[in-house]
Image: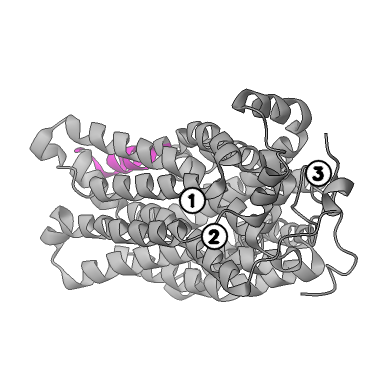
Amino acid sequence: MKTGSADTAREPRRESPRQVRRAIGASAMGNFTEWFDYGVYAYTATYIADSFFPGDLESATLLTLGVFAVSFLVRPLGGFVWGPLGDRLGRRQILALTILLMGSATVLLGAVPSYTSIGFWSPVLLVLLRMIQGFSTGGEYGGAATFMAEYSPDRKRGFYGSFLEFGTLGGFSVGAILVLMIDLLSTDAFMATWGWRLPFFVAGPLALVGLYLRSKLDETPVFRELEEAHEEESSVGAEFKDLIARYWRPIVKLMGLVVALNVCNYTLLSYMPTYLENRIGLTSTASLVLVVIGQLAMMAVIPFSGALSDRVGRKPLWAVSMGGLLVLAIPMYLLMSVNFGWAIVAFTTLGLLYVLQLSTISATFPAMFPTHVRFAGFAISYNVATSLFGGTAPAINEWLVERTGNDLVPAFYMMGACAVGLVALCFVAETAGASLRGRGIPGIDTPAHPTALAQT
C-alpha cells in the first residue's frame, strides 16, 4: 500500500479558478434542491397532515413528522449503494443520478392525491416517495461534499466548502419564502388543497439546472490522480473490508460529530416551525417570518465562518459551537416564549452558534478519509448517524414534548447531542490545510502545510 509521503511527492493537479467556481456551484445546487425539499415539507407539515392523515391535529402532525423520519431511515441504504459506486466510478456520475432521483420524488409528492380521494393509498404513496428521496439523498450529500472538497485548494477548503451549506440554508429559506408568499396570496381553502403542493413542483426545474451544471464538469482532480495511478479499490467488497478493518476509527468519530450536527440542524431548522406554532402559539406566517430572518442571518456569516476555519482550524470552531449551544440552549428556548421579537433574537443566536459547525462540514468530514474510500466512508457513517439522530429529531421532540408536557425538551435534546459531539471532537485530527490527495489519511498521513493556519 502506498503511503501519504509517497502521495505528496506527486505534483498536484491544479484547476483554474473558473473550474473551481463551477464545481462549487454544481455541488451547492444539488444541496439547495435537497434542502428545499426538506424545508417545504417542514413548512407545510400541518397541511400535509390534514391531507394525508385524517384525525386530530396532534396525531396527524406526529404521523407527518414520522414520515419525514422514514426518509432518513432509508438514507444509510443509499450511502451503502452510492458511496462505493462513487469511489469506483467517480463522483460526478453518481451525483448526476442522485439529483435526478431526488428532484423527481419531490415533484411527484406534490401530485399525490389526498386521503379523501384515494384513501389508504395516499399515505402509502407519500411514504414511498419519501423513501426514494431519502435513498437518493444518501448519495447526494456525501458525494457533493466530497466533490467540493476535492476541487477546493487545500488552504481555502473551508471557505469554498462553506458554499455547500450556503446552499443548504438557501434551500430552506427559499422554501420558506415560497410557502409564505403562496400563503399570503391565497385563501385558506386553496392553501389546504393545492397551495401547499405548488412549492414541491418547483423542485423539478431546480434538479434539472443542477443536472446540467454537473454534466458540464470533469471528475475531481483528486479522483483522477487516483485513477491514473490505478490506486482505486479493486472491488466493492474490498472497500467494505478496508472500511471496517482500517478506517473504523474515523467512522466512529464522524458519527459522534454528526449526532451533534444533525440533532441541532433538524431541531432548529425542520422542527422549529411546528414547535413555534404548536407550543409557543405563533401563527404559521409569524413562524415562517422568524425562521427566514434567522436563516438569512446564518447565510450572511457562513462564508466568513468557513474562511475563519482556514485560519484557525476546524476544531476550534466546532468546540465554540457545541460549547455555546450546550450553555445557551435553555436560556434561548425560554427567551422564545416571551414574545415574537425575543423569539427572533433567541433563534438567531442559536443559529449563529450552529453555523460554526455547519460552515465547515465540507472541509471537515471528507478530510477524515483517504481518497479511495472517501465517498463511501463519508456517506455511510454520515447517513447512519443522520438516520438515527437527524431526521428523527422532529418526531422525537414532538413526542417527548407531548408525553412530558415540557416545552424545553428540544433544548435538552440539543444539549445531550452537543455533549456527545464534544467527546468525539477530542479524538479528531486537525485537517485545515492538509492535502486530500492519495491513500493517506489527511491530517495524519498528510499533515497540514506549515503556513496553512496563518494564510487564506
Question: Closer to the N terminus: mark 2 or mark 1?
Answer: 2
Nearest the viewer among 285 and 242 is: 242
Q: Is residue 147 above or below residue 391?
A: below
Query: Helix, strand or loop at disc 2?
Result: helix
Q: Which kind of residue does numbered mark 2 sit on?
A: Tyr
Expressed as whole percent of the image width and height from the top left, the position of residue 396 reads 48, 39
Number of the label disc, if any, that sits on residue 333: 2
Do the numbered discs 2 and 1 sit on residues whose CB atoms are within 8 Å? yes
Magenta part of the chain: 54-69
Q: Which kind of residue does numbered mark 3 sit on?
A: Gly
Is residue 291 within the magenta segment? no
Image check: 38 left or right of 218? left
Expressed as whole percent of the image width and height from the top left, the position of residue 118 reads 11, 34
Number of the label disc, if any, that sits on residue 407: 1
Image check: 315 left or right of 63? right
Nearest the viewer among 354 and 90 is: 90
Which residue occupies 24% across, 51% down? 47
Which residue occupies 87% across, 47% down? 6
Nearest the viewer among 225 and 91 is: 225
How many marks can you see?
3
Q: Is residue 455 above or below residue 336?
A: below
Give the number of the mark in front: 3 or 2.
3
- How busy is the neighbourhood of tag 3: few (under 14 within 10 Å), some, or many (20 plus)? many
Q: Which kind of residue does numbered mark 1 sit on?
A: Asp
Expressed as whole percent of the image width and height from the top left, the position of residue 380 reads 59, 36
Question: Closer to the N terminus: mark 3 or mark 2?
Answer: 2
